[in-house]
Amino acid sequence: MRLAEIKETESALLVKLLCEIDHHTAKSIREEVDKRLEDVKPRELILDFSGVPFMDSSGLGLIIGRAGKAEAQGAFVTVEGLSESQRKLIRMSGIERLGTVIIK
Amino acid sequence: MRSIINEMKLRLPAISVNEGVARSAISAFVAELDPTVEELGDIRLAVSEAVTNAIVHAYRDLPRGEVGNVYISVRLYDTREVSVEISDNGCGIENVEEAMRPAFTTGEGTERSGMGFLVMESFTDTLSVKSKLGRGTTVLMRKYLKSLPEGEE
Ligand SMILES: Nc1ncnc2c1ncn2[C@@H]1O[C@H](COP(=O)(O)OP(=O)(O)O)[C@@H](O)[C@H]1O
Ligand SMILES: [Mg+2]
């Protein structure tokens, strides 16, 4: 199963997530993304959720964790392609108030 | 008086692949009541949180190689109520009130958000958590599905 498609653009590392995100899948996604993040050292990490049919609070942990990693490298995180229910989850979590994650 | 129209009991080993298995099983089972996409999504989400907690937290003190169980019991009522009980025989929770506070987590680092109980609470109609140290935890959630449009009963 393909978990994510990762592409480098001029200024960003673009991660299109392609699976249900729970604690089970989050572990492999995290490892894959963090490795590329360290290799590429982009200015921006874009997490595209448009290919994610389901996510639970493990997805929130995934975003918060990547935001921390990115910040330590002087990068910021943009989250895009959210469904209505994913947006509701994110609003509940207060991620927007962290200041290091841009929710599109 | 409401009466039960169907009932399902599952026992799954507490391994992470069963988070998705639990979601699929409950989706198939609840389909009989014709829930809306949103209602089904809410139930899948709440179940995912409770089952994940049993898998991640309940058996964290077990010796390597030993695997605990997660028990899932679902009931459908003629009143269109869905009740889901998820339990484990794990370590239990010392202070349930504290554990249920948003952002509280005993998980390491930032990978667990501490939002699981808040999600269960927000996406179902009632939530109750009972836990005994060293004995285990039981989470009971109820969801009341909207009635079907006239003529589709
Ligand atoms: N079944 C369980 N057994 C033992 N501890 C649990 C269980 N469920 C939840 N907990 C405790 O409650 C805390 C909060 O749970 P939750 O809100 O789902 O956040 P998270 O799973 O992200 O830590 C957990 O960190 C854990 O300490
Ligand atoms: Mg949890």
Image: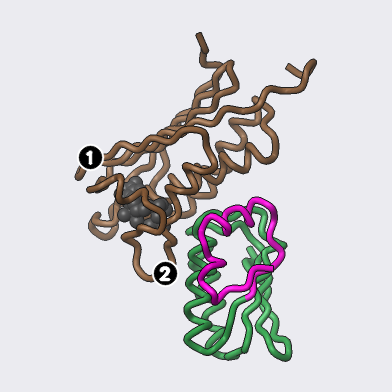
Magenta-colored stretch includes residue A77: no
Whether disc 2's CB lies below 8 Å from ligand 1 is answered no
Residue B110, numbered circle = 2
In this rendering, position of residue A32 left or right of residue A19: left
x 50%, y 23%: residue? B7
Q: Residue furthest top?
A: B1
Residue B37, numbered circle = none
- Which chain corresponds to the colour green? A
In this rendering, position of residue B27 left or right of residue B46: right
Label 2 and label 1 in one chain: yes
| Quadrant hosting residue A20 | bottom right
Q: Name the chain under label 1.
A: B
Magenta-colored stretch includes residue A83: yes
Magenta residues? A78-104
Colour chain B appears in:
brown
x 53%, y 89%: residue? A74
How crowded is the residue under tag 2: few (<14 C-alpha within 10 Å), some, or many (20+)? some
Which residue occupies the foreground of this view, B11 or B88? B88
Give how far across and how far down residue B144 sits, in percent: 57, 27
SS class, disc 2: loop
Which residue occupies the foreground of this view, B74 or A43? A43
x 27%, y 39%: residue? B131
Q: Tell me the quarter of the image containing the C terminus of chain A.
A: bottom right
| Quadrant hosting residue B39 | top right
Give how far across and how far down residue B50 sits, in percent: 43, 45
Q: Residue furthest right?
A: B151
Give how far across and how far down residue A37 sits, in percent: 56, 84
Which residue occupies the foreground of this view, A21 or B25? A21
Residue B132, numbered circle = 1
Residue type at mark 1: give it. Answer: Lys
Q: Name the chain under label 2.
A: B
